[in-house]
Image (cartoon, helix red, strand yellow):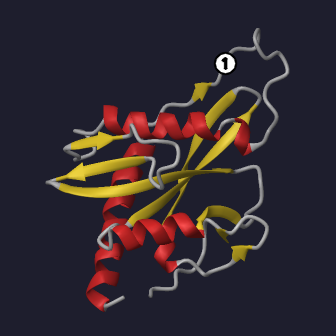
Amino acid sequence: MPNNQIQEVLDEISFVENVFRKLLKILPSFDVTNEKVLPYGLKPHTRSVSWLVEQVITQQTKYNAKALGLTDVNFDFPDTCLHDCELIHRGKSYFVNVKIHSMAGKENKNDIAAVEKLYMQYSAEPSYNLIYACFGIHFQNIHIRFDPAYLNLFSPQFLPIYVNPRNDKIQALYHHQPVPR
């Protein structure tokens, strides 16, 4: 990847990070349900709430688009899509995949994306730049609170590569040293 393309990806990451840092200041804490429905709460696994939390992030981004300096936000994509939302600013699109990290857990390698899906997307559309945005949450029983200090953004193009041989997915820590290439 030429240096100007690397810089473009870094600039896009910086822009999206600024948007989401503003969003973190306005994201509400919320209860997933009530204690009458789940008297013992949910299991403290991120997968118990990740899709719902991702929806809160993407929908709050759209709802607060103007305050975040965005023209629009789209989030109505098929589940098979690599990105969860498209941020639009001055006619430019930023494609974002939202990830969740439970602050109670330790940092582990996580499945990022299927190698084949990334390859097909980047081959079909070489100008496509995917940005992963990982938000930290505190999750207790039925209550979710966003961690204002935890936000990690990265490009799959700059991941230190490890492919999980069991499922052919790229794995990485959400917080890692990027390898620009």
Residue 31 sits in which quadrant? top right
Is 78 situated above or below 95?
A: above
- Tell me what residue is drawn at x 76 percent, y 49 percent: 104
Secondary structure category for the residue under label 1: loop
Few, some or many residues within 10 Å of mark 1 (<14, 14–19, 20+): some
Residue at the left extreme of this rendering: 90
Task: Tally the marks.
Answer: 1
The residue sitting at the right extreme is 40
- Residue 3 placed where, x, y %? 31, 90
Q: Is residue 87 left or right of residue 131?
A: left
**118 and 99: which is toward the camera:** 118
Farthest residue, direction bottom: 2
Which residue sits at x=61%, y=65%?
Answer: 174
Quarter holding the C terminus? bottom left
Left or right relative to 41: residue 11: left
| Residue for badge 1 | 33
Residue visible at 41% across and 64% down? 130
14 displayed left or right of 70 = right
x, y percent for residue 79: 52, 43
Where 168 falls versus 36 (above or below)?
A: below
Please say whether residue 78 is visible from this viewpoint: yes
In the image, residue 134 above or below residue 114: above
Residue 157 x %, y % = 47, 77
Q: Nearer the viewer, residue 129 or 137?
A: 129
Task: Place residue 42 in its image quadrant.
Answer: top right
Give x and y (percent) for residue 65.
27, 39
Q: Quadrant of the N terminus?
A: bottom left
Which residue is nearer to you in this view: 2 or 133?
Answer: 2
Residue 26 visible in this rendered orientation of the protein: no
Q: Amino acid at mark 1?
A: Thr
